Image (spheres, grey):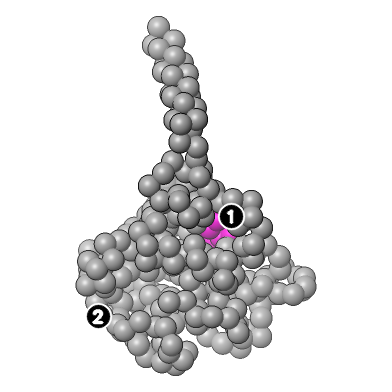
Amino acid sequence: MAHGLSAASRRIRVWAGRAVDLILPPLALDDPHAAGRPQSPGLSARAWERIAFIDGPLCDGCGAPYPYDVGRGVLCPACSVGVRLISRTRAACLYDEHSRDLILKLKHADRTDLAPLFARWLSRAAAELLDHADLICPVPLHRRRLLARRYNQAAEIARPLGRLTGVAYLPDALVRARATPTQGGKSGRGRRENVRGAFTVPKGCARKVAGKRVLLIDDVLTTGATAEACARALLRAGAAAVDLAVVARVRESGTEPI
């Protein structure tokens, strides 16, 4: 009898969903009228075709795409000679005029409904990192910026990513102990100086990250200064390694995120 009721309940939910869709047809997430309306879980075909997803060969270190296949596990010249605190980085797509609009909607326009979509993108783009991750941790906002924005866009992506993949989500593994000006418009060196010492691991979380491989989550990768500062704090707290997954990475000659 319980099984019959369960089946009947599922049928009712399906028909109720179809009725709602008939009255208020679902809109793609990129539709300008989508906010506050029933939505599909993805983008329109037109928007999907424009996103420059990173699917091909890439540097195994920083995740930068190669123009042609150079072999699995090959590092780019910068990663071969440089010392990086981030072990490996993966990005779902390139940051350009097409992905920028979606990311800024999440970041500044209260479109948190886009976060699960980005989480699905990362579950694919960073699959090999997720396979080895013990913890998922978002890049934190300072409490003043968090109060002004009301949510942390990196956390909004990291939370559903944890649910989707089963990797433990630790939202408070890092805190931004010092408020910093925006990174926009700064040089690589200026960005590094801006976030130097800005992040710390709370004492209560140090034992949780000790010996663990942490996957750091953010929305956009520009120079990597913020991620490196986060990684430094995590490694000092005893993390075994830190990887990074972002929704989009800036082209070397691209536009900086806002």
> Residue at the location (57% across, 71% down)?
97
Indicate the quadrant containing the C terminus: top left, top right, bottom left or bottom right.
bottom left
Q: Quadrant of residue 158?
A: bottom left
Magenta part mainly helix, strand or loop? helix
Picture quarter containing residue 77?
bottom right
**Is disc 2 placed on a helix, strand or loop?**
loop
Q: Which residue is mark 1?
A: 124
Percent from the top left, x then y, of residue 109?
Answer: 37, 62
Amino acid carrying label 1: it is Arg
Tag of residue 178: 2
Residue stretch in magenta:
121-129
Query: Up-down: is 164 above or below 194?
Result: above
Q: Taking the image as drawn, is residue 206 in sight?
A: no
Amino acid at the residue labelled 2: Arg
Q: Secondary structure at mark 1?
A: helix
Q: Picture coordinates of residue 82 (x, y %)?
A: 56, 87
Confirm whether residue 230 shows in the render: yes
Q: Quadrant of the N terminus?
A: top left
Query: What label does residue 153 carry, if any?
Result: none
* Residue at mark 2 to residue at mark 1: CA–CA distance: 33 Å
